C-alpha cells in the first residue's frame, strides 16, 4: 500500500483542484492529482520516444542517408507523395 504524501500546491492549484471536484470532473482531489500525474507520465514517455526518433534521424543524416531539398516546396511535395504511398 502506498504511503500518504503531504505537500503544498499553493493557492492557485488548490483552487483548481477544488473546482474540479466541485464541478464533478473528479470525485476527490486525490483522483484529480493522480490524473495529472498520469498525464505527465504519458507526456514524458512521448517526449522520450520523440528524442529517440530524433537521435536515430540524426545518426542517419550523419551516415549520409539524409536527403537534401532545394526548396521547402520540394520537401513538401516529397512528404505529400510519401504519405499517399502508405
Image (spheres, rainbow, N blue to C red):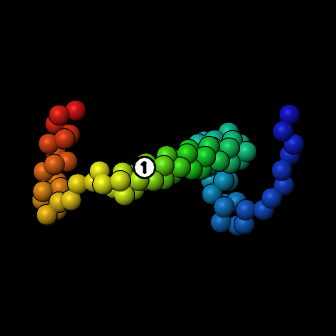
Q: Quadrant of the C terminus?
A: top left
Q: Quadrant of the N terminus?
A: top right
Say which residue appears at 70% left-offset and 67% top-offset: 11
Whether residue 76 is visible here, answered yes or no, is: yes
Residue 55 in picture, x, y percent from top left: 45, 53
On the rendered structure, is 9 left or right of 20? right
Whether residue 21 is visible here, answered yes or no, is: no
Residue 16 in picture, x, y percent from top left: 63, 57
Residue 39 vertical placement versus 73 (above, below): above
Say which residue appears at 58% left-offset and 42% top-offset: 25
**Residue 35 lies in quadrant:** top right
Front residue of this view, candidates 70 and 45: 70
On the rendered structure, is 12 left or right of 45? right
Front residue of this view, candidates 48 and 52: 52
On the rendered structure, is 76 left or right of 64? left
For label 1, the crowd category at 10 Å Cα-Cα, with few meaning under 14, some 14 to 19 and many 20 or more, is few
On the rendered structure, is 85 left or right of 63? left
Say which residue appears at 14% left-offset and 64% top-offset: 71
Q: Residue furthest front?
A: 63
| Circle 1: element type | helix
Residue 71 vertical placement versus 24 (above, below): below
Say which residue appears at 86% left-offset and 46% top-offset: 4
Residue on which disc 1 sits: 56
Front residue of this view, candidates 55 and 17: 55
Q: Residue furthest bottom?
A: 11
Q: How many numbered marks appear?
A: 1
Amino acid at each position: 500500500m502506498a504511503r500518504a504524501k503531504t505537500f503544498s500546491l499553493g493557492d492557485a492549484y488548490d483552487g483548481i483542484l477544488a473546482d474540479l471536484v466541485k464541478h464533478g470532473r473528479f470525485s476527490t482531489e486525490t483522483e484529480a492529482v493522480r490524473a495529472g500525474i498520469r498525464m505527465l507520465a504519458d507526456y514524458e514517455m512521448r517526449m522520450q520516444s520523440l528524442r529517440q526518433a530524433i537521435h536515430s534521424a540524426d545518426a542517419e543524416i550523419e551516415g549520409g542517408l539524409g536527403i537534401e531539398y532545394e526548396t521547402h516546396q520540394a520537401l513538401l511535395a516529397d512528404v505529400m507523395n510519401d504519405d499517399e504511398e502508405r
